[in-house]
Image: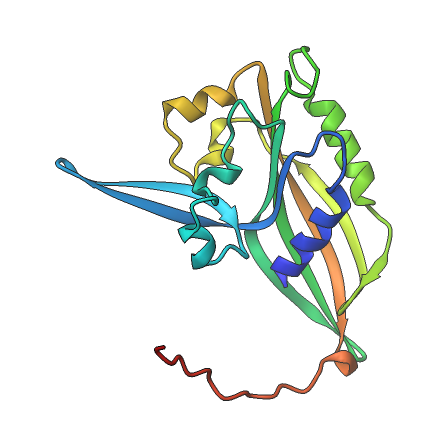
Amino acid sequence: MIYDICEILKSRLIGQPYVDKIAGLVQVAQDVKNTDNGSIVKRFPIACDVTGKDCADASFRLSDLVPDSKKKSVIYFEDISGVTFRGQERNEFIFQARPRLVCWLNQKQLGKNQCSITPLVVAHIIKTLGTNKRFNDGLYIKANIQVAGQVVKTPAIFQRYTYDEKTTQFLMFPFDYFALDIIVDFRVNSDCIEEWLVEPPEVCLDK
């Protein structure tokens, strides 16, 4: 469910002038390199729907969502506390998801040179997400988006990942970043849940 909710949030931001690299729910990918001094493990955020084939493809980079000077911005969502089941009302299951939106900004690439453009972008994102307006989207009904608040601005926002000094320089001026904790309340009509059919497993044949 959290993946679908993040896809809905992402779809509302695509096409905005400050959006460059954007993903829905991310997961942590590990890149392990063996050296004479032992193994070096680096962790990066990658889109949840990235496959092994994508990683093997030379055109795909593990660092696609890592800040660098060539990008205008990077936006993605993290799963902070999963999805909570809050009960049932008649034939409707009630849920709450609490994803976190992480946004990094390259102010020069966006044509800005003030100390911080976070206030402007935060306000625009809240407006674009359409907070406190109920909507239906596929299986999810009576959904409502709220912004719980802005996370304290420290490099800890990126603590899940092992960014080196070359990358952490992009967390200082003229670059900017922030994170928003989001609450999405939604329901699922039990009458709309399709019957689960177990399919036989696929058999891989060598050719």
Q: Quadrant of the C terminus?
A: bottom left
- Name which residue lies at 64% across and 20% down: 109
The colouring scheme, among rainbow, by chain, secondary structure or one colour, is: rainbow
Residue placed most toward the observer, 49 or 9 = 49
Left or right of 176 on screen, residue 134: right
Left or right of 162 on screen, residue 90: right
- Name which residue lies at 76% across and 30% down: 17
Locate residue 161: give its quadrant: top left
Q: Quadrant of the N terminus?
A: bottom right
- Name which residue lies at 68% across and 57% down: 5
Locate residue 85: give its quadrant: bottom right
Relative to 103, residue 166 above or below: above
Q: Furthest residue to the left?
A: 36
Percent from the top left, x then y, of residue 106?
61, 22
Residue placed most toward the observer, 148 or 57 = 57
Percent from the top left, x then y, of residue 6?
66, 53
- Name which residue lies at 64% across and 16% down: 108
